[in-house]
Amino acid sequence: MAASSKVSEIDPSAVFQHTKWQNFGFSGTKLNGIRFFDCQIRNCLFEQCQLEDWRLWSTTITECSFRWADLKRSALGGVLEGRRNFYTGVDFSEADLRQTVYQAAAFERCAYRNTKLVKIDFQTSAFSNCQFEGELNDVLFYHRGFKGEAFPPNEMLNVDFSHAKLRDVGFRGLILNRVRLPNDAEHLVLKDFASTLDKMVNVLKQREDITAKKVIAFLAIERKWAHPNQVQGVLNIQDLAEIAGEEGVKRLLEVVPK
């Protein structure tokens, strides 16, 4: 990605409306507090930038790099008069996205490699052909978030988590039929997720000990949000160990259908 013009500084808290940025290089600059309304940003470099408290509404970002950028406390999923933001071919690798806020947005061909994704609720944000690597911690993906009926649902089409670590990550109301999940020593992938959870809970209910009850409580949270036709789901073994200990992990593995 090459940017033809370099920009050294933009006044903090600047507001841009109906503006097009193309082929700009902002890398290493401080651009905190900018607001975008109905803008287009194409082929720009924001690598290693300080971009805290950005707010975007009805804006399209295409083929841009935010590698190593600091986007903390930014509203990346703002909606303006029913129009959401679109991100296409955007690289968020190693960026800091903590405390970012979303109502609805569309992400296509976006990369999240070792991105700081902590305590994020994506609401009605839709992902397609995106890749996640590294740890996600306390992150929620929805088929459709709160009051998201006006926007296309999130189908999670061709989304790759195979090299990710999913800690307290929730997939709410999603079928996950076109998603690659991590399948390693820390993750347990279950097919026919809702019915498999029901079977496991029924077996555990036959036991009265406190460990079984802790495992049931852990599975109940997953079951509450599972789609009836969910093709697959994933449990993080470390998440369970923090609740029910190693004995709880052992108990869970004993009741996994063969």
Image: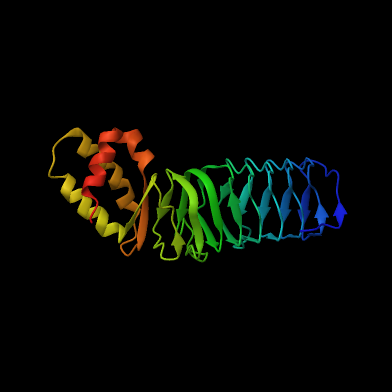
Q: Is 56 on the left-hand or right-hand side of 106?
A: right
Q: Position of residue 254 (x, y in %)?
A: 22, 46
Q: In the rendered view, tell whether residue 65 sits above or below residue 95.
A: below
Residue 216, visible in the rendered structure: no
Residue depicted at x 42% and y 54%: 171
Residue closest to the eye, 124 or 163: 163
The quarter of the displayed image where residue 51 is located: top right
Residue drawn where x is 20% and y is 33% of the image: 210
- Quadrant into which the N terminus falls: bottom right
Total numbered badges shown on the rendered structure? 0
Q: Position of residue 81 (x, y in %)?
A: 62, 61
Q: Is residue 31 left or right of residue 183?
A: right
Q: Quadrant of the C terminus?
A: bottom left
The answer to whether residue 30 shows anywhere in this view is: yes
Residue 23: horizontal and vertical position, in percent? 81, 59
What is the x, y in percent for residue 90? 66, 57
In this view, the residue in front, 157 or 35, is: 157
| Residue at 16% over, 45% down | 205
| Residue 61 in the image: above or below residue 166 | below
In the figure, residue 30 lies in which quadrant? top right
Q: Residue at x 62, y 48 (%)?
A: 75
Q: Colour mode?
A: rainbow
Left/right placement of residue 236 relative to residue 33 reads: left
> Does residue 26 sit above or below 212 in this rendering?
below
